Image (cartoon, rainbow, N blue to C red):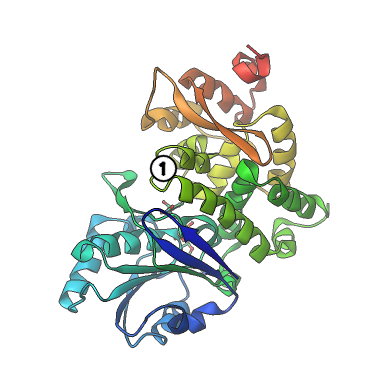
Amino acid sequence: MYIDINTKESEYKVVIERGCISRTGEMFNTDRKCLIVTDDGVPAGYAETVASECSRPLIMTVPQGEGSKSTEWLERLLLMMLKEGFTRSDCVIAVGGGMAGDLAGFAAAIYMRGIDFYNIPTTLLSQADSSIGGKTAINLGGVKNIAGVFRQPGMVLIDTELLDTLPEDQMLSGFAEIIKAGMIADADLFGYIEKTVLGDNDADPGSIMKKISIERVLEAALRVKKVVVEEDECEAGIRRILNYGHTIGHGIESVTGMLHGWCVAVGMIPMCSPEARNRLVPVLSRLGFPLRIDCDHEAVFRSMIHDKKMENGEINAVFAEEPGNAVIKRMTPEELRGRLHYITGDRDEIRTDREETGT
Ligand SMILES: NC(=O)c1ccc[n+]([C@@H]2O[C@H](COP(=O)([O-])OP(=O)(O)OC[C@H]3O[C@@H](n4cnc5c(N)ncnc54)[C@H](O)[C@@H]3O)[C@@H](O)[C@H]2O)c1
């Protein structure tokens, strides 16, 4: 199965197929120098399988974790390509999660003003979300993703077999992004998840995840992203809809350090109508996501609005009217602060909000 992505700048395929990495050489041109970038938390066999498909492979293994999305590791990748005589005919292949993809994609985008880049995502989060859309970046000065470019990959190979080794908390982190896709633009996707997750009262989150058809939900989530990215490649407008759950989620992430998808899951709760929340919360709850945050709420609020662009004192926020239908709304920082109370336990104060009061 594959999905075509057609942006103004480029066209590429996203292949979704169990076991496809062992056919990497049939998928794109690997008869050249290939720098394979992976991290030391990804089973080494995945990069080795890809390397066995390349005529002149070179594997660079960076330390796992956000710390490698740095100028230091970017420089190491660029210097390695320089030392090995990489030209514009050669390529970079990421074999890892969103971290490896963002770092390797950025290195490929700037080496000799851009060489071919292929993404082989190995986490659910990167398969469902970060590997398509062309965002690449490193962190700088303690600020996430502050230096990077938009540059689409030449192809994305999604091999769902690679998820067999992924820890459950990472699976759920990626699944939160799939729930997000359903909430913003695919009522059927959300309905399928809701039915499967709520179908068995006794099942634990791990067993529930085994009942989900990963190929099915991945395809649906990627189709949501495809439509948005094709319309707004560089996030000038509608692409911001993909940030549903992220405004509050980022604030929680920076204060608690919880996994990205887990923070997005909690961050979605305050940003919806009461009807949408009544359907979202039971699903998140059954999957074991926290429904409340127990941390310095003011710090979350400060971090939430810290890097947000204000227009006439308001922030663009994404709000779900119902599953499958989200809109971009202007909200004042005070409205956002009020919404935080949905996840801090003090629900009465939300009455200041415009939607619920109808003012
Ligand atoms: N470019 C984008 O559009 C975009 C979108 C969302 C997030 N991101 C970025 O993605 C990153 C987060 O991505 P992530 O959640 O994939 O995290 P990650 O890449 O840090 O991977 C998470 C952990 O899983 C391990 N791992 C990866 N694949 C595995 C496998 N198959 N089996 C066992 N362990 C495995 C890794 O070693 C790591 O320890 C962040 O840097 C974020 O900024 C980018």
Taking depth in this image into account, of 309 and 6 the one nearest to the observer is 6
Q: Which residue is mark 1?
A: 235
Relative to 240, residue 149 above or below:
below
Taking depth in this image into account, of 265 and 154 the one nearest to the observer is 154
Residue 282, image x and y in percent?
74, 42
**Amino acid type of the residue tagged 1 in the rendering:** Glu
Q: Quadrant of the C terminus?
A: top right
Q: Quadrant of the N terminus?
A: bottom right
Taking depth in this image into account, of 153 and 289 the one nearest to the observer is 153
Residue 18, image x and y in percent?
60, 75
Looking at the image, the residue that sits furthest to the top is: 359
Count residues near mark 1 (Cα–Cα under 10 Å), then give few for <14, some for 14-19, many for 20+.
some
Relative to 294, residue 29 above or below:
below
Where on the picture, by quarter, is residue 210?
Answer: bottom right
Q: Residue at x 67, y 62 (%)?
A: 216
Q: Residue at x 56, y 57 (%)?
A: 222
Q: Residue at x 75, y 53 (%)?
A: 192
Residue 303, image x and y in percent?
41, 32
